[in-house]
Amino acid sequence: MNNQFFVITGIPRTGTTYASAFLNSQDNVVCLEFPFFQFLGNHSGSKLNILIANTEQYFRRANLDFPLKERVHNSRDLLDRIISAVKEMYGVEYVGFKQTRLNHLQIVHLHKLNVKVIYMTRNINSLLFSYLNRIDHDIFSATSNLKEQLDSKKIIEGIKNNNSLIIDIEEFSRDEISKFLQIALQEPEILYYSLGKSVFPYEINSIKKANYVESSINDIDFSDGLDFLKYNVKNRFFIHHCKFKLKQYFKKYF
């Protein structure tokens, strides 16, 4: 892998955190949850000062020294300094960033910079149950948020090239990622997340089966996005609060 950094993205509950922790737990890799994309705009002046202050706070929350020791001229220069400092701090050769919800245009921009992007995905049933288990036990609230998964399918179609790897969390493959990033990877005994590398073991949460499953949805297949919509429109309260969203669904998908 010759690129300076790689990126993990996808919508929440698709395994971005697990993928990041897996790579962050390799001997020669650091993968940080960090809003790196805003640094690519070559910002200067007051915007640069805000980014410097936010970055300093980010490292200090983890009880780490702020890596910037020399003056920088713009935000991209700042990102390069952060990457170099992190490599030195952890004694690694490769650095990656996890930032969820990157859109199609942002990913295309990364491709133009020759940055490799791992886009995590998940089948809509598992995504729903994960959301119910970890975020919100309300089935109506959960399904309303699945629109993001439907939108992500269009992103996937638009980013398929040699600089993107689309991975379903249920089919997570060390060998596939290793080949894509051109980095030798092992199966780590302990996972570490972000700046907690080699310090704080990470408890996996992204791929757990849902403990909370409404009996009324056990036999519903949400795979095509239409069934969960039909399920919700039976609920008048849901229609009252999501009328606009439902209209958009029908226009865009059906």
Image (spheres, rainbow, N blue to C red):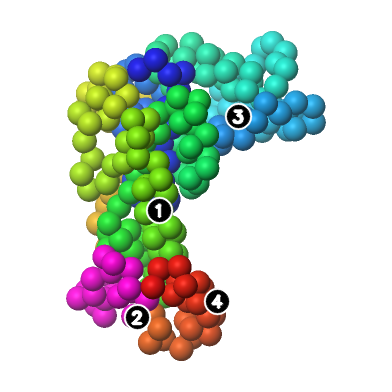
Specify whether 44 is left or right of 67: right
Dividing the image into 4 quarters, which one contains the N terminus? top left
Mark 4 vs mark 2, CA separation in Å: 15 Å
Mark toward the viewer: 1 or 2 = 1
Question: Quick one: label 1 or label 3, which is nearer the N terminus?
Answer: 3
Q: Which mark is residue 244?
A: 4
Nearer to us: label 1 or label 3? 1
Tag 4 or tag 3, which sits nearer the N-term?
3
Q: Which residues are magenta?
A: 212-231
Dot 4 crowding, Cα within 10 Å, few <14, some 14–19, many 20+: few
User: Which secondary structure lies at badge 4?
Assistant: helix
Foreground: 26 or 157? Answer: 157
Give the structural element (helix, strand or loop) at label 3. helix
Q: Residues within 10 Å of mark 3 (few under 14, many from 20)?
A: some
Q: Within 10 angstroms of label 2, few (less than 14), some, or many (20 or more) residues?
A: few
Q: CA distance from mark 1 to mark 3?
A: 24 Å
The three-letter amino acid code for the residue at tag 1 is: Lys
Amino acid carrying label 4: it is Phe
Residue linked to disc 2: 230
Asked if residue 79 is positioned above or below residue 248 in the image, the reply reads above
At a point 61% along the width and 35% down the height, the residue shown is 38
Sequence-first disc among 1 and 4: 1
